[in-house]
């Protein structure tokens, strides 16, 4: 770094930036695997300690680049030496931090936690220092007002405005003492949200139950029982002669218990374990949640916004917290009559099954009776799908659909998981765990390598719950007649793992989850914006779920099912009567399903907009239950607040933005109506979708992109009509 610093004297801004980049490239490839610019990382070299070093080094390099921008005089300013340089200033830091965060999510350990604890406060301080840098802001503000900005192409003009808006919304014009307070808030929030993540993961892993009496598991499938038996053996519980069964709170293990087990005591014990994650004991998160809300409110007010949601959504499709609340409240009101009918029917069904009058539902029996009710109504058992949904068939079918519709080809790459110091065999690429696979995506016509993605699909103790896609690096944009360089991303999930024969038989929930995440992956792989910062899923947050939710539709359509639904032993296609039953059951209690997700969105908005009035000074569980009582099935016992464990809204990107799931679901239902009309396997429709939705990224506004594909604005009632909750007008 001293070499880099000393080389800057006497150079023009562009020369100085080039010197920083050249010195970095030579050094990083040798000694800094977290910043290595080659497409595929060397995972065996990516130790937590090295990750911390690389993040800190990346910050120093970014500081040098920003300092060069600060030296640009008004008459010297160009797009390249101000905005182009700003876009690229923290590339190495961002890459290194991304890999550290990724490893923390999939290979958790005390060492990776220590590395994150070391670098996150420094990263927060660095991020805050950017918009607090008055010299930098002066250069950017001055450059943004120069006449040459109007001659830029529309995407670069958009980026200029985004940078300016970002500085202003981050408090660049605040007086010094308020900037200092903002830095303190950001630093504390970073520490708290990291602690929240760790508490939720630790609390989830801390609960397990070893069952010694098979009768307690009556109703569960042989596949589940065998998987639980193998899990118990792996931990030293039971023997081949005297088996035991391990239940954990991993959703692929927990959900079947709640849906299928006939033994109420078993369901209750598992529900109590799941519901009390991060409630009480050393991993309780209530105080963290309260402090996060207070700090976010203070931050928003400091930056001139009425509340945190207004700050969060200022440049999203919805534009304001009030509009987000109106959207959620409006949908809830539309759903209320149907929800009340479904609630009454559900309670009547439970009463029929139990022979008792029911005015409240035991939460540990809700999923069980819902599953039984659906089975009786539609003669459909969701578990009957598993033999026709073997993982390899699902993956191949999913790829086949995408290849046909979007003009791409997907190839698997041989992989190996190495220990530190081992050499990678020729023809193979490293991965971080033996379960991980790697795929390359090519344009079918040009044969250009569009990107590559890792797939890590099965649960383990070191992996956090849920499913997600992370863009690890965006390829350099197309230039000089060459296509963009390949992107790199990861698709991570916690699906039903393989049985002892090595076959994973997926539930339909698993299949939907995989298709959902692959929709995000398509957004990344097909991205072809003119700037790296606009690539992939870097779109308005309430637009980002459109590709993922739209992609779920092929798990229900006969044409989609035909690509992967074959019996894993005989190869026979899924019977038509099973498909018919599945489709009839698709929208079982749809108002209840919608209301559940809208309830979370309502809670998220109210906490981030009206915390003092509705939550402060009250127990979190009581305040949550009071808020959501009109929109829930009444339960027989208190329900712990989901905000205790909702990483999406406390430590993730959905704080003040959980509404966007339902918002995007409306967009997805509306957008899929074009596929439904023109053919769900129509290549022309698929090509238009790739061109207008997947490729642009954030190069244009989400509203414009949507209109380009649909030829009109979204239909706000599309989802409810699709589900039969409101009639066609």
Image (cartoon, helix red, strand yellow):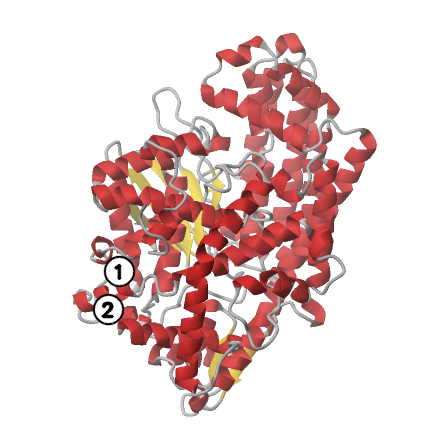
In the picture, measured across the screen, residue 312 lies left or right of residue 191, that is left
Task: Give the class, few, some or many, for how many residues have Cα within 10 Å of label 1's Cα (few <14, many ≥20).
Answer: some
- Please identify the quarter of the rendering in which residue 582 is found: bottom left
| Number of dots carrying numbers | 2
Q: Can you say which quadrant of the picture contains the C terminus?
A: top left
Q: Give the mark nearer the N terminus: 2 vs 1.
A: 1
Q: Name the residue under label 2.
A: 568
Q: Residue 203 carries which label?
A: none
- Is residue 428 in view from this perspective? no
Q: Which mark is residue 393?
A: 1
Residue 42 in the image: state x and y as whole percent.
49, 47
Q: Which of 339 and 497 is in front in this view?
A: 339
Observer-nearest residue: 724 or 415?
Answer: 724
* Residue at figure coordinates x 39%, y 30% from the top left: 484
Q: Local crowd at mark 2 within 10 Å, few (<14), some, or many (≥20)? A: some
The vertical placement of 709 against 370, above or below, is above
Discs 2, 1 touching: Cβ within 8 Å = yes
Secondary structure state at the residue bearing disc 2: loop
Q: Relative to 107, is 482 above or below?
A: above
Question: Residue at left 66%, top 32%?
Answer: 169
Residue 561 vertical placement versus 154 (above, below): below
Q: Distance between the residues labelled 2 and 1?
A: 8 Å
């Amino acid at each position: 770094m001293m070499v880099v610093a000393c080389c800057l004297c006497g150079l023009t801004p562009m020369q100085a930036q080039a010197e920083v980049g050249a010195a970095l490239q030579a050094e990083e490839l040798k000694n800094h695997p977290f910043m290595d610019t080659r497409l595929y990382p060397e995972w065996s070299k990516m130790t937590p300690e090295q990750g911390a070093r690389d993040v800190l080094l990346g910050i120093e390099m970014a500081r040098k680049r920003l300092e060069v921008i600060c030296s640009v005089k008004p008459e010297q300013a160009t797009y390249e030496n101000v905005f182009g340089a700003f876009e690229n200033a923290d590339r190495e830091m961002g890459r290194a931090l991304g890999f550290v965060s990724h490893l923390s999510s999939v290979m958790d350990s005390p060492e990776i936690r220590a590395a994150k604890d070391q670098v996150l406060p420094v990263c927060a301080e660095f991020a805050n220092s950017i918009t607090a840098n008055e010299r930098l802001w002066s250069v950017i503000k001055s450059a943004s007002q120069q006449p040459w900005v109007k001659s830029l192409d529309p995407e670069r003009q958009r980026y200029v405005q985004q940078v300016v808006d970002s500085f202003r919304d981050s408090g660049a014009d605040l007086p010094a003492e308020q900037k200092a307070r903002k830095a303190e808030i950001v630093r504390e929030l970073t520490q708290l949200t990291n602690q929240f993540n760790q508490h939720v993961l630790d609390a989830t892993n801390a609960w397990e139950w070893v069952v010694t009496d098979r009768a307690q598991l009556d109703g569960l499938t042989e596949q589940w029982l065998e998987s639980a038996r193998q899990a118990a053996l792996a931990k030293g519980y039971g023997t081949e002669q005297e088996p035991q069964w391990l239940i954990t709170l991993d959703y692929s293990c927990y959900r079947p218990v709640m849906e299928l087990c006939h033994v109420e005591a078993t369901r209750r014990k598992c529900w109590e374990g799941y519901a009390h994650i991060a409630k009480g004991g050393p991993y309780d998160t209530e105080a963290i949640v309260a402090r996060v809300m207070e700090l976010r409110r203070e931050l928003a007010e400091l930056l001139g916004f009425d509340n945190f949601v207004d700050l969060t959504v200022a440049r999203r499709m919805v534009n304001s917290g009030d509009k987000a609340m109106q959207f959620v409240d409006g949908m809830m009101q539309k759903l209320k009559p149907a929800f009340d009918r479904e609630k009454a029917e559900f309670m009547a069904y439970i009463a029929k099954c139990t022979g008792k009058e029911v005015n409240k539902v035991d939460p540990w029996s809700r999923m069980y009776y819902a599953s039984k009710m659906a089975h009786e109504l539609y003669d459909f058992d969701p578990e009957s799908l598993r033999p026709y949904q073997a993982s390899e068939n699902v993956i191949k079918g999913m790829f086949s659909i995408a290849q046909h519709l979007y003009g791409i080809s997907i190839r698997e790459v041989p992989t190996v998981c190495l220990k530190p110091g081992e050499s990678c065999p020729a023809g193979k690429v490293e991965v971080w765990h033996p379960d991980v696979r790697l795929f390359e995506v090519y344009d079918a016509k040009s044969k250009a390598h569009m990107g590559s993605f890792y797939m890590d699909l099965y649960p383990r103790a070191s992996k956090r719950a849920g499913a997600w896609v992370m863009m690890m690096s965006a390829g350099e944009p197309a230039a000089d007649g060459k296509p963009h360089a390949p992107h790199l991303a990861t698709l991570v999930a916690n699906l039903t793992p393989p049985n002892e024969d090595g076959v994973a038989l997926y539930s339909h929930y698993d299949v939907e989850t995989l298709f959902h995440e692959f929709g995000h992956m398509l957004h990344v792989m097909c991205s072809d914006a003119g700037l790296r910062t606009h690539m992939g899923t870097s779109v308005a947050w309430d637009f980002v779920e459109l590709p993922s939710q739209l992609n779920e539709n092929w798990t229900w359509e006969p044409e989609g099912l035909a690509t992967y639904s074959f019996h894993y032993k005989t190869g026979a296609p899924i019977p038509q009567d099973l498909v018919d039953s599945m489709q009839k059951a698709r929208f079982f209690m749809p108002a209840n399903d919608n209301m559940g997700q809208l309830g979370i969105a309502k809670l998220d908005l109210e906490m981030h907009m009206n915390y003092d009035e509705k939550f402060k000074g009250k127990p979190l569980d009581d305040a949550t239950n009071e808020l959501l009582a009109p929109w829930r099935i009444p339960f027989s016992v208190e329900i712990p607040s989901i905000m205790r464990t909702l990483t999406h809204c406390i430590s993730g990107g959905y704080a003040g933005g959980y509404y966007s799931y339902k918002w995007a679901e409306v967009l997805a239902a509306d957008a899929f109506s074009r596929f439904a009309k023109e053919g769900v396997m129509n290549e022309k429709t698929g090509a238009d979708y790739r061109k207008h939705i997947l490729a642009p990224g954030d190069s244009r506004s989400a509203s414009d992109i949507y209109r380009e594909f649909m030829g009109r604005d979204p239909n706000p009632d599309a989802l409810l009509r699709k589900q039969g909750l409101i009639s066609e007008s």
